[in-house]
Image (tube, rainbow, N blue to C red):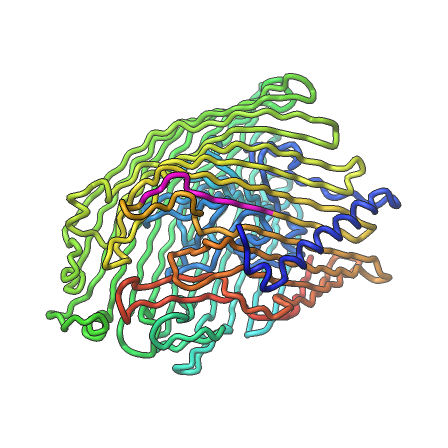
Amino acid sequence: MKNGNCRRTGICRAVTTALAALGVAAAGSIAAAEVEALEEVLVTATKRSEKLQDVPISVTAFNAESFEQLRPDSLADLSNRVPNMYMPPPNESSTQAITLRGLGPGVTRSSGRSVGVYIDGAFSSADNLTDLPVSDLAALEILRGPQGTLFGRDTIGGAVNVTTRAPGKELGGFGELDLGRYERVVATAGVDIPLRQDVLSMRLSGRKQSYGGHIDNVFNGDKADGLDRFSGRAQLFYTPNERFSARLSYSHSERDDNPTTGENAGGTFADQIPYRVNINVRESFVQDADSLMLSMNYELPSGHELTSITGWMSSSDRSLVDRDLTPDNISTQAILYDVDDLSQELRLTSPVGQRLEYLVGLYYLKSDVVNRDTYPLFGAAWLANIGFPPLLPDVTDGQEREINTKSWAMFAHATYHVTDRFSMFGGLRYTDDQKDVRHTTFGEVFRAFGFVSANLVGKTQDDPLTWTLGARFAVSDQLKTYASVSTGYRSSSLKDDFLTAADLLNPAGNITEPEFVTNYEIGAKYRSAGGRASLNAAIFFMDYSDIQVSIAVPPLLFVRQLQNAAKAHVQGIELDGAVRITEGLTFTTSVGYLETEYDEFRPSPTLDLSGTGFGNSPEWTLSAALAYSRELAAGQLGLHLDIAAITVPDDFQPNRSQLELGGNSTLNGNISYATNDGLWRATLWGSNLLGRDDPVSTTIWGAGLGLNQHSVYIYQPPRSFGVTIRRNF
């Protein structure tokens, strides 16, 4: 595919040249003087603690050092450092889409995701909680490719595996204050409290973030993207003996933001001037979320480990959106989104070091969602824009959905070590998914457009079998290779938006079948003898069948019909590397390349999309970073510089927008100084140092509704800078 954006900006060439030049320089320095090795990274991608270099999965792992250098506020800030990962800004209800290897969100609100999110082993189904704050975490792993055996449903693209920081056994903690441009204030703190020596300890942590905003509302002079957020966690860690441990964690978060739906870039009152809106409604998003997790581990006399992970999560959201995106009183939308999850996993894991290593498990999930969209302002002015007379009586229009999911599964995974260097592995998972969706439509405008107002219930049940099979071979102590075939599935979807009488007469356009992915992958992981350099590479080809798609039904293009496209394929490469160039100087990089293509897809008798791409993912994802540290008389000086860029294919058109969306890039850096006693650290930081204002997301609202149709841009945040002070104790 051609990529005009890369040629226009030149940033892609700069990044590529930097990667090549620094890579050559790093390789040439390997034979130089002895320096400290890179830290060995441990991951739990296989539900065991293993070295990253030994895991036969394409994984990007972040640890405490990564968080300190990259300074992310949330998962989205890390996504552009992950090969073939794409996280555009959230939509009007702060629902965050995660796309891995070209596989993204579902086609309806009741659809399953393609990327599962797991926090301390517990699944989180709420899409509005996926852009989780990176605060008080021990590790964050991005597992690419279907994880249908160990993680299960709705992980056809991959999984996000988050491990929070556990309570320590000694009294200690930290406090941190971050001040930046646009009235940014972030206060973070954590403390470990031993309650009984070596038996019971507690950790308390919290984060408060406020942001004045950088988008001007020319209607009233206010800011249109302010943030006010809090998150906190309380944990207990109980270890009465060497065989048993239990960890109880309670988390609470609150948000009171005024996020923008996007900047009106196509439609009435539109312009394409970054960081400016002209709306007469103060948009808002208010959220309260709570979660409780209990993890217990018991080592049997045989050395087997029994693990229980119980998770409960509840969130409640309220949003208000200026749907017409103009200074006129035409249309507003209020959104309610409540989620309650309960999950339970039981696992039995064999001891390590045996010729046959295995684990078996059971899993259960119950999820209840209530989603209600209403239009407090939705009458004469909106109808006039499409040539309709006023309708009486003028009552509130909207839709409500109740989505109830029950899922259980049993799974097994095993590795057989044929020799010290060669092993084979495989796994199997059976899942039973049941989903009920109750849908109600109300209001005079919706009735006039033919949307059904009856209380309708749709049901689906899936019972897929997913599996993985592969082999690992250690060419040497430094070079490990693997080859695998793995499968995954996304659960069935039901139409839950703008139901019509035609949908009831044509069930084939109302409910989809599950979709399936078979991933063929080979990989190599290298770590030099002295531990100064590492490079992990994967090449993959994915067969993608029964793809769930939504097709516009003219003339109302926002009314969609569901169907399963015949099949497609996805292929690409992924690279993660690091090298300690000299003492104190480290270079890291990541590269992803992706191609998507429908093999067979005819949405209608007159339209053939076979041979085209999905249009939802970047073609190249590139990142590089240099970190330098030097010991001084009274402390340590640190310098960090990182760059990330994406380029897009010619058919890139996420969210069916009519606006062009090219690639984007950002350059960040910081300078830090830490005292030798480890108690104090000060950091001067800057983000988007080049001041780029590339659009990073686009959406079309009211497609086919004349003057009510608008296309929006969301631009990358402008250049910012600030200072962070941290005190450890």
How many numbered marks, from 0 up?
Answer: 0
Relative depth, front residue between 155 and 251: 155
Q: Residue furthest front?
A: 606
Q: Main secondary structure of the magenta part?
A: strand
- Judge from the rendering whether residue 526 lies leftward or rightward of residue 219; answer left or right: right
Whether the magenta-drawn stretch holds residue 595 is answered as yes
Q: Residue furthest right?
A: 33
Q: Position of residue 190 (x, y in %)?
A: 60, 56
Residue extent of the magenta highlight: 592-602
Quarter location, residue 441? bottom left
Relative depth, front residue between 555 and 624: 555
- Judge from the rendering whether residue 155 lies leftward or rightward of residue 536; answer left or right: left
Quarter location, residue 416? top right
Q: Position of residue 609 (x, y in %)?
A: 37, 46
Q: Is residue 205 visible?
A: no
At x 49%, y 73%, the residue is: 274
